[in-house]
Image: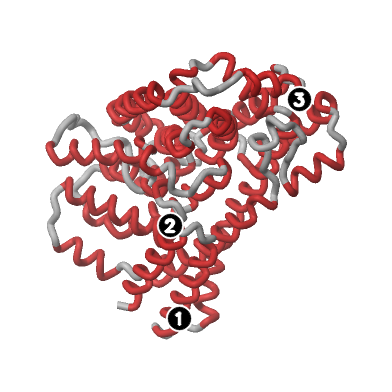
Amino acid sequence: MLIFIGILFTLFILVFSVLNNIFLGYGLTISLLFFTFIGLKRGYSLKKIGMLYWIETKKSLNIILILVLIGMLISSWLSSGVISSIIYYSLKYVNPNLFILCAFLITSLISMLIGTSFGTVSAVGIPLIIIGKAAGINLGILGGAIFSGAYFGDRTSPLSSSLLLLCNLTDLKLFDYVKKIIIDNIIPFALCIAFYLVLSLKYPLTSMSNSLSNELYNYYNVSLLLLLPAIILFLLSILKVQITHSIPISVLCAFILDIFIQHTNVYDFLNYLVFGYSNNSDVLKNIIHGGGIISMLKTCYIIVISCSISGFFSGLNVFENLKVKLKEKNLSKSSIFLVTVILGIINAAVGCSQTIAIILTLDIVKDLYEDEPNDELALDFSNSAILTPALIPWCIAALVPCSVLGINSYSYIPFAFYLYIVPIVHFIRKKFNLFNTKGKELNTEVIKN
């Protein structure tokens, strides 16, 4: 009973924090103390509980390192003129009447190529947001298009860590499964194109003046050479170089370009890496700024506390009774998928992690899929627990991109159509047994990473 109260309390305090623009770290800290109390009431020692927290927190260190590197990447790209060059050429060649649709298509393509939503948001999401901000476009709509595109690759790219994890957990061959997921993606992707086309026509870049392009060109010595750090990041990602290695290489390249093209001194560049970039242009100072290690510290704190809470749930096996009760229900295929969606949302909301949502939800529902082929189980998870965490403002899957883009932590949600359409279409397919291609189950050889 106390666990149930703790979950409700956590959800309440986090929703309250989001709606009132209160730092999420406060609510999560209170929630962590509450779960610590529950653990003590269950007879666990403070040392044992602390170990559970530490086990999961250690896993977050890599995410924190990536966040720190992203902060440095953003400031180095801003200072060297990389982002300004991307914006300049985007304004020159992208159809202003289709800007929101282009934002979705561009982020979808990049996320498919590099397989990481965080990398996609950092590389192309920031320039798109800056353009939208300068043009006065609703950032919630634009943010929704960027989120949709970024998580397109998170669900379908063979380079996606989420997809690799899912294939490992379900014993599927990666590239065989990728073929299946791409076919499954056709209808949702087409519907998203239609929705973003309508929004693009309703909210074009008509308010954009040439002053931004001119100021960018003059202030940053814009040239195609300045796209090199972005190109390097994309190529290294495609070559499966770890993001913790590819980002420093891109930052180093940006540093060299900054010194020789923008004539920034070394001290200022290092200062930008830590405290964020700023400029003195009257036109650009309110839109070309940010990044730096300091800008990521609050997000890092939230991630540490979130992972500690995840450790509590994974370490104490709090869902054993639920597993038994679900098994007794004898649910239909569509009902099982609905349960998977709901549990994925709850686990992501409480555990604040996409990985935790996948692992905990799979542990709870796997017995319900004992009569289903592994690829159908994986497909249910691709259409639920991989996507739905990005709809929860305090979950890492949403929190990090929002922090990077500098947008409101919940304004994008109504417009992130891809995150809704995929589970809805899949539910309809299962409910009415549509598009059901009965064939051989995918080979269940374990992936060798």
| Nearest to N terminus: mark 1 or mark 3 | 1
Say if mark 2 contacts mark 3, CB within 8 Å. no
Identify the residue at horizontal 30%, vertical 60% (top origin).
364
Distance between mark 2 and mark 1 Cα atoms: 27 Å
Query: In the figure, 300 relative to 138: above or below?
Result: below
Give the residue at mark 1: 37
Frontmost residue, 290 versus 235: 290
Identify the residue at horizontal 54%, vertical 34% (top origin).
120
Residue 139: where, in percent of width, then height?
48, 37
Disc 2 vs disc 1: which is toward the camera? 2
Residue 418: where, in percent of width, then height?
35, 35
Q: Secondary structure at mark 2?
A: helix
Residue 419: where, in percent of width, then height?
36, 40
Query: In the figure, 12 relative to 206: above or below?
Result: below
Identify the residue at horizontal 54%, vertical 41% (top origin).
118
Check residue 219 in the rendering and tell me which mark sits there, or answer none: 3
Frontmost residue, 93 versus 433: 93
Check residue 233 in the rendering and tell me which mark sits there, or answer none: none
Give neighbour class at mark 2: few <14, some 14-19, many 20+ (Cα, 10 Å).
Answer: few
Residue 246, visible in the rendered structure: yes
